[in-house]
Image (cartoon, grey):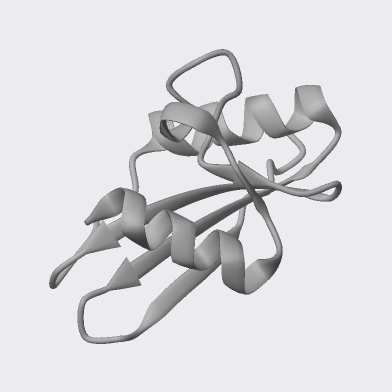
Amino acid sequence: QGRVTEAAIAKERGLRLHPMSGAGRIKQDASDREQLVEVKDANRSYTVKASDVKSLHHEASIQGKEPVLVVVFTNGYEVEAVIRRRSR
């Protein structure tokens, strides 16, 4: 179901879907000129891992894009989070 959700989100937002869900040379699931997007499916809950957030932020920074995490729940709700790194 993950790839179907990724394709739907990409189409809704006018994003370009990345081959192999970002497992290849192009990282993350989809992008446009301004955003790098990772899409996750969830039934009842989703755990945000620091390593995933760091990876998304790092790759987006390299590309000069805004990192966005989208979690899509099976009940029709979705959460969109823009990832930012706090200054130390």
Residue at screen point 35% across, 84% down: 77
Left or right of residue 35, residue 57 in this image: left
- Is residue 47 among the parts visible in the rendering? no
> In the image, residue 29 lies at what x, y percent?
51, 41
Q: Nearer the viewer, residue 61 or 17?
A: 17
Assign the C terminus to one quadrant of the image. Answer: top right
Q: Is residue 35 above or below residue 59?
A: below
- When asked about the image quadrant of residue 45, the answer is bottom left
Assign the N terminus to one quadrant of the image. Answer: bottom left
* Residue farthest left in this picture: 44
Residue at screen point 43% across, 34% down: 21
Total count of labels: 0
Q: Is residue 29 above or below residue 26?
A: below
- Is residue 37 among the parts visible in the rendering? yes
Left or right of residue 33, residue 30 in this image: left
Residue at screen point 41% across, 77% down: 78
Left or right of residue 66, residue 5 in this image: left
Left or right of residue 47, residue 78 in this image: right
Q: Nearer the viewer, residue 14 or 52?
A: 14
Q: Is residue 53 above or below residue 37?
A: above
* Residue farthest bottom in this picture: 76
Residue at screen point 53% across, 68% down: 80
> In the image, residue 19 lies at what x, y percent?
50, 30
* Residue farthest top in this picture: 25
